[in-house]
Each structure stands twice: as structure tokens, then as C-alpha cells.
Amino acid sequence: MPEKAPSLCFLSSEADDAKKAKAELVGRYGNVPAGDADYIVALGGDGFMLQTLHETMNSETPVYGMNRGSVGFLMNEYSTENLHERLQAADMNELRPLRMTTRNADGTSSIALAINEVSMLRQSHQAAKLKVRVDDRVRLPELACDGILVATPAGSTAYNLSVHGPIIPLEAPLLAITPVSAFRPRRWRGALLPNRSVVDIEVLEPEKRLVNAFADHTEVKHVLHVRIEQDPEARAKVLSDPNRSWSERILAEQFSD
């Protein structure tokens, strides 16, 4: 008897091209709920891929993205041909998200996960003033800046790169901590940290220097303190074509224009 084909769940963004691609693929390969699928196929851009990874965190079902959006760094090339074979030949990457824990001005606290980065950004005309601790040791008593972020290897080519942070190979056990428009100390350009590090960032003068925190797309307003660390349990599984693996994409980005 022929081997049974893997079951697929197709998810798409609201973009017209993505919805059209989903209809075509469902007609060709069928569709099952995400909880019953061997593979989840995400159709859209990088934003939708991040959303899908968050929604399927710890499900053990790998996600394979195909680009039907405006940005596709995280995605594989779109094709309707030989999808079962592509999925079975794909490289598996396991991503370890960051956990952001905040203490907020209204007395509440919150927890959110970030696959790319945790960032803190000023929300007034005045620069943010932040105290940065790494593993309970003060590293920056006062950083005057527009913001700061901590990025994973997977996220190092996203917001981190746009503010001149370092690109980290996917396999490296590192995190990048990068300032956004640092004013003082002027020469501080960030640091590379072991991925087991715990970073605590305290907002100084929070009454007049409002700061919001972000874990990927989750925003928390008017934070007083943020702790950032690798979540000990959360995992996301991502598939990439062997000829365009995530490791190769991140390496190639370091030699791009």
C-alpha cells in the first residue's frame, strides 16, 4: 500500500494573494484543523508567520511558511508543486522565545513571549532613561536613549539589524542587547550576551519619561520595570527548504548590500 500523505492545515493572512493561494492549495491537497495536522502551512508575509508561530507555540506541529506578503525573510518560496515532498525534505529549526515580564505604573504586571525581540521605546518628547542589569549586576547605571531591545538569533535580522545591532547565527547560544538612538553613553553600541542571561531594565523618572514595552507585536503601556530571559519551556518549530535554510539566510544577510 502507498504511504499515506501527511495531513496539512493551511492558514493565510487577509491579503488577497494569500487568500487566493490558500484556496488553490486547499483544493489540491485538502485541509484539516491545526490540531489534527502533521504540518501547518502559513501563507502571507513575515508578520503573519510570527503570528502563526505564536498561535502554535508548543504544539509540536512544525510550521512551513510560503511567501504571499510584502516581506518574506522568514518564508519559503511559493509554489503549488510537490508540497508533500518539500515538507518532508525541509530542515527543522527549533526557536526558543524570550519571556518578557513587566511591572507597570498602574500596579499590574504582565507576561508575554517574543520570538524576535523584546523592546522598550520612549513615549514622550524626552529621552528615556534606563538602568540596565545583566544577571543582577548593573551594567549601565543610566542609559539615555529612544529605547533598547533584546533580540534572539532569529530576530537579529529584524528590528535589531535596522538599529545597527549585530546579526547572530541561528545556532549561536547568544542574545543581542542593542540601544535605539543612544544619547549617553554615546559610544555604547550594545552587547552580545549568553542566552542564559537575565536582563532587568528599570525605567528612571517614569512619571515624565514614559516607556512602553513590546514582545514582538504585544504592547504593554507605561512600564516601570522589564525582565527579559529565555523562556525555559516554550518552543516553536519552523521548516525551511534545504536550499534556503534559516541559517543560510542569516549568514547571507551579513554579506548583503
Image (spheres, rainbow, N blue to C red):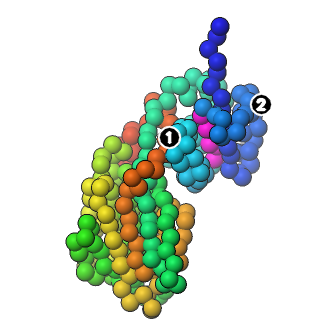
Pinpoint residue 146: horizontal percent, then vertical percent: 41, 78
Is residue 68 visible from the viewing direction of this image? no
Residue type (three-letter) at the residue carrying disc 1: Val
Which secondary structure lies at badge 2?
helix
Pinpoint residue 110: horizontal percent, then vertical percent: 50, 70
Which secondary structure lies at badge 1?
strand
Pinpoint residue 112: horizontal percent, then vertical percent: 50, 63
Q: CA distance from mark 1 to mark 2?
A: 24 Å
The residue carrying mark 1 is: 238
Residue 111 against residue 104 in the figure, above or below: above
Find the magenta span and give its range.
39-46
Residue 168 against residue 188 in the figure, above or below: above
Pinpoint residue 157: horizontal percent, then vertical percent: 41, 53
User: Along the line of sight, which residue is nearer the eye, 237 or 123?
Assistant: 237
The residue carrying mark 2 is: 27
The picture quadrant where one finds residue 38 is top right
